[in-house]
Image (cartoon, grey):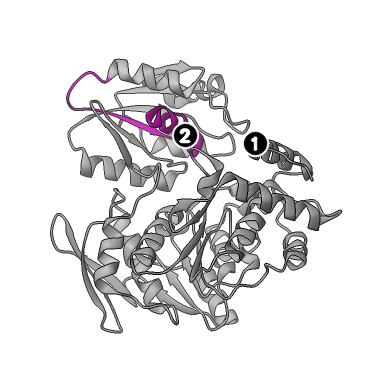
Amino acid sequence: MKNFTLNEWIDWQCKLHSTNMDFNLSRIKEVAKRLNIHKTSSKVFTVAGTNGKGSTVAILESVLLESGYNIGSYTSPHLIEFNERIKINKISVDTEEICQAFELIEESRKNITLTFFEFSTLAAFIIFSKKNLDVIILEVGLGGRLDAVNIIDPDVSIITNIGYDHTAILGDDLEIIAFEKSGIMRKDKPTIISYENIHESIIKNSEEIGSNLQIINKNFSYTIISDNKWIFSNTDGVEIESNYPGIKGLPQINNAASVLQAIHSCEDIELKNEKAVVGIINSSILGRFQIINSSPTTVLDIAHNEQSIETLVESLREYFPHCNYHAVFSVLKDKNVKQMLSVVKEFFKSWHISNSDNERALKVKELKKNNFFITEEVNAYDSIEKAYEGALEYAKKENDVIVVFGSSYTVSPILNLNSK
């Protein structure tokens, strides 16, 4: 018995295995079998993709809960506290439950080393196994095929979109990245594709596996009918009119439509139209186009790659047109910073860049050297909190908007400030 606190467990897990990430499912599969958690009678939805996974999980969770199902969800990363990763019916599980699960894993693993993410995943499966759950929702951490959550077979797979991210691990070829994401597909089970122009590697892998692809604007679609109304429809004749999702941002109707198709496609799970609409409206998630202050308006978004930053810019122009935007920004050193910044050239009136607490973060002195900041007004700080204070000094006008983005580690400190 280790009798660790949760923070002590996490610190210890981060040092246990030789690397932070080790994409080899044999170790976690073996420990899961010892714990008898490698299978479940609950229906399983697994969500992969480059951007939009977390929002899709949140909408799916909200719709199913509103429809009367008991839901367990596992997501990453967390923004305020670790407990956010494991939820029962949208409520984070207790610290004591997590620590007890870690104890069980430690007793069972023997000489098998596990990464932090593998420990977390097994803990979620242990906790889910003790609840009477109708549905388990799993968000892929990275990739899909070799991600720890993929040891459990999904009844429905959802692939949100494909873009460049984690290229040092997944490669810089979109077809290869798409293949890795498609590793969550299963034989004779539906796979919901949330984007058009599906990659050839997904089609080919689906044909080889025997998965049933259902693609947006082919098997299902949505139509915007007013400033706050849209209609979902599919080739089976289902039609649902709904208000916009509770989660703000332009991609969320697309995500909501994919969720409705996923539920419709799941055997023994009923898509209840009126309940689904309430679930969509009540959906929420931290750090995705999250508006926390009205004076000045502050938008928090974990946008951390070129594709998600493009979406962030589009949403800002849609929700806050003709405004002055001020950036609070930090980024991890394994990202393509040049491409990320190219998307926002001459978009922000001022930049407030910073170090973050994460060891993977790009140091502010290195970020400041980027050629991008030759023409942009930049201010450098040693903490995210101080960068935000700096932005507040610039955002004095009624049409000023502060935008905090670049990674989850950029958004997290401001969320903590706001919660206090």
Comparing labels 1 and 2, the label whose residue is closer to the camera: 1
Range covered by the magenta-colored residues: 395-420
Going by the numbered disc 2, the residue's amino acid type is Ser
Q: Is residue 168 above or below residue 407?
A: below
Q: Could one spot residue 83 in this view of the protein?
A: yes
For residue 219, what is the image quadrant?
bottom left
Looking at marks 1 and 2 on the same chain, the residue that comes earlier in the sequence is marked by 1
Q: Which label belongs to residue 160?
A: none
Number of marks in the image? Answer: 2
Q: In what quadrant of the picture does the C terminus appear?
A: top left
Q: What residue is shown at x 44% (from left), y 78% (from top)?
A: 266
Above or below: residue 170 compared with residue 352: below
Answer with left or right where residue 9 lies relative to residue 195. right
Q: Is residue 398 magenta?
A: yes
Query: What x and y, as percent, mark residue 123?
Result: 64, 55
Q: Secondary structure at mark 2?
A: helix
Q: In the rendering, at what x and y percent does residue 226 appear?
A: 13, 59
Q: Residue at 57% across / 68% down in the picture?
A: 184
Let me know if residue 377 appears in the view.
no
- The Cα atoms of the two marked residues, 1 and 2, are separated by 17 Å
Mark 2 closeness class: few <14, some 14–19, many ≥20 residues within 10 Å: many
Nearest the viewer among 334 and 10 is: 10
Q: Residue at label 1?
A: 7
Q: Is residue 288 left or right of residue 73?
A: left
- Kindly identify which residue carries mark 2: 412
For residue 377, above or below residue 286:
above
SS at mark 1 in the image: helix
